[in-house]
Amino acid sequence: MQDFTGRTAVITGGASGIGLGMARSFAARGMHLVLADLDETLLKAAEKELSEAGTSVVCQVCDVSKLEDVERLAEVTLDHFGGVHVVCSNAGVGLPTSARNLKLTDWEWIINVDLWGPIYAVKTFLPLIEEQGFGHINATSSMAGLVSSQMMGAYNVAKHGVVALMAAVERELRAKKSAVRASVLCPGPINTNISRHSVDFRPGRGKPKGDSEKAGKLAGNIQSALENGMHPDEVGELVAKAIEQEKFWILTHPHWAKTVQKQLDAMVNDQTLIRA
């Protein structure tokens, strides 16, 4: 079991939602924190909460879709704490629009944040963790990274990519007998503001126009599911425990894995795609 007391954790998308839940759980274990986000107001609020509770915390505005921002985040981390031991690439966005109607600019934006963000985190931070000889790198995917749902094409593509990325990293680390570990978080409905933040930070702002009626209905259903979902602090605790126990798969709703199994069974038995 890995012990991270007095060590340093970096969390992107760390100012709210799942990221802040992770921060609270890591802080409770005596870790120093570096929180990255695009929302300066939420970053300041998170810094105030955690620092008043006695945690050493540094906040950095960071666009994870830009390699230079992620590299700067690493520099800030090393400057303040001299090392990094846990990295959680958690920032994410999504828009409910069909794959055929989603604008290419939105495809690029979603994939740049949701997939290139974790790729940049692995490229930038994993060598730093490996230099220390132990540590952990995690990325947030989704159940949408295991089973694709309609009207979320770009999100599905990116989140499947995150699962593939982290599985490759974990296998490579074990093959070289490294003490560093990797994991992937696949959450179901969590009570976060990802929908609102996705609209707020979408390039050009505003809601996508394609599939407006159907997308609007789906967006409402998604928001309702999120509002009734698991509390982010519960997710943060799941992540912290999984990292301590060196687990790879982190599922917030493990019973949903039955859908994954049904998809595998259909693939083997009759090559059909089950409805999800």
Image (cartoon, rainbow, N blue to C red):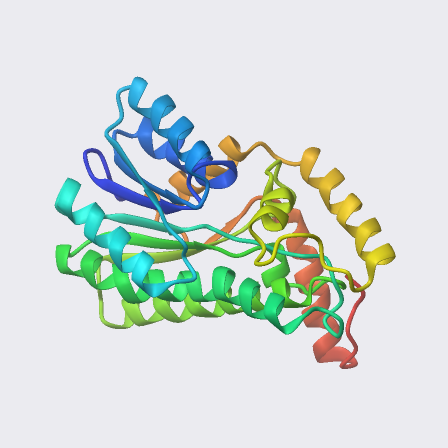
**Residue occupying the point 73% across, 65% down:** 262
Q: Is residue 165 left or right of residue 205?
A: left
Q: Quadrant of residue 169?
A: bottom left
| In the depicted structure, whether residue 7 falls above or below residue 85 | above
In the displayed orientation, state which residue is furthest to the bottom: 271
- Relative to 123, does residue 73 appear above or below in the rendering? above
Say if residue 248 shows up in the picture: no
Q: At 75% from the left edge and 75% from the top edge, which residue is drawn?
A: 100
Q: x, y (%) of residue 120?
A: 35, 64
Look at the picture and state if 182 lies above or below 236. below
Residue 171 appears in the figure: yes
The residue most toward the top is 52
**With 74 as the anchor, is 48 left or right in this view?**
right
- Comparing 258 with 71, the one in front is 71
Q: Residue at x 32, y 57 (%)?
A: 69
Residue closest to the far front:
204
**Screen quadrant of the C terminus:** bottom right
